[in-house]
Amino acid sequence: MVKPDTYETNGNSVSIGGCDLEKLREEFGTPLYVLDVATVKKVVSDYLSIKDNYANARISYASKALSLTAVYQILEQDGLFFDVVSDGEFYSMLNAGVPASRAYFHGNNKTIPEIKVALEEGVGVIVVDNKDELFTINDVYQDLGLDTKVTIMVRIVPEIEAHTHEFIQTGQRDTKFGVHFENIIDFVETTKEFDFIEFAGFHAHIGSQIFDTNPFHVLIDTLMNLSVEVNEKTGILATAVNIGGGIGIQYTDQDDPPSVREFVAAIAASMKDAIARTNYPIEPILILEPGRSIVANAGVTLYSIGGVKEIPELRNYISVDGGMADNARPITYGAEYQADIANKIEEDKTEKYTIAGKFCESGDILIKDIDLPKAEKGDMLMVYATGAYGYSMASNYNRYRKPAMVFVEDGNSKQVLKRETLEDIVRNDLRIN
């Protein structure tokens, strides 16, 4: 479903989470990110249903989809773990009161300051991306004078290509991420040089916006076969396998992803089959890292229409008060979205428009050729499925201020992100005199 679960209409008005969107616009202004908490909780419940079929499973939220203190707070209530890829995401998680032990720290080039803060805070697992990183971890560990164990996993290159945008494919051989198969045994043997390191297992990620479950079945077989080989050649038993995230979501009516419950049931069955086939001596922890699929469809972005430009026999433009700085996906990936004029939700869609952003780039187009009611200055455009990678990829391009965000639930709205001010824009500027 493209829309949030609590989406409702009443005449020419729309509510989400029991909150009227026009009233939210009046109170918080636009552009405005709106996130429906009930939708998020429903998807989390669906993911946690994997435990019905494979009890030793963990759901680790991929923070990069939407890293925000309030998001960590609501997800931590359900016992989720967290995938972080920077000290900023890690710090945001800690700021929400989530224990460091619930974090999996990823990244293909973690800096020394990032490794330092991870070790000092007692991070749960460091997902090591290359052999050089092992030695960097050791150097930092020794400099800090620590005497506790550090749990690691290694990211492998599974050489599985999912059918998705080339920029979000990560499983193919030609990738910046991970250790290749021919180097795995050497990597695992090297971990034995460090008494403080506990090797937990393998991580892989094959991409994003994947609608087919078959690549995940192949990935599970690959990870379990590798676990057997490593055990036979090194004596080390992998106690965890992490298949990453990547399940697709519905951005438009043409998208047809599997349901989360269907997906996790299939994954659990595949894991059990792989364990039985390989005669693996334990049931490893099975980790899934969904991000986009937890928050994307829970979110909408509200814009105010500033004007309509008609080019006879060519194109009609609607200009809104946001664009590529609050949603970079269209200009980056050619991503497609659905939208409505919220205050004309019941009116016939008699016109075709292209939605243009306000930024100084001809490519700042949010949606091309969408059917909508006749638009006028002051109307409110609502773009669906923007809960993931809207705010996360937002910028201050043209020195525009990043939008606010509100959570809505049971008729109540809660601002969880302030709209930036002009003072925020120059906060880090230094004058030359």
Image: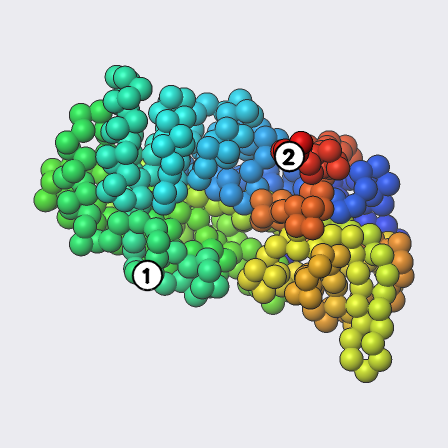
Instruction: Tell me the amino acid under the disc marked 1.
Output: Asp
x, y percent for residue 275: 24, 46
Please tell me which residue lies in front, 285 or 430: 430
Please tell me which residue lies in front, 199 or 290: 199
To which residue does mark 1 refer? 174
Q: Can residue 181 be seen?
A: yes
Q: Can residue 271 be seen?
A: no
x, y percent for residue 236: 16, 37
Q: Which image quadrant for residue 213?
A: bottom left
Instruction: Tell me the amino acid under the disc marked 2.
Output: Ile
> Quadrant of the image for the N terminus?
bottom right
Q: Residue furthest front?
A: 433
Q: Residues within 10 Å of mark 1 (few under 14, many from 20)?
A: few
Placement of 195 over or under 240, stated as above or below: above
To which residue does mark 2 refer? 432
Q: Which image quadrant for residue 137?
A: top left
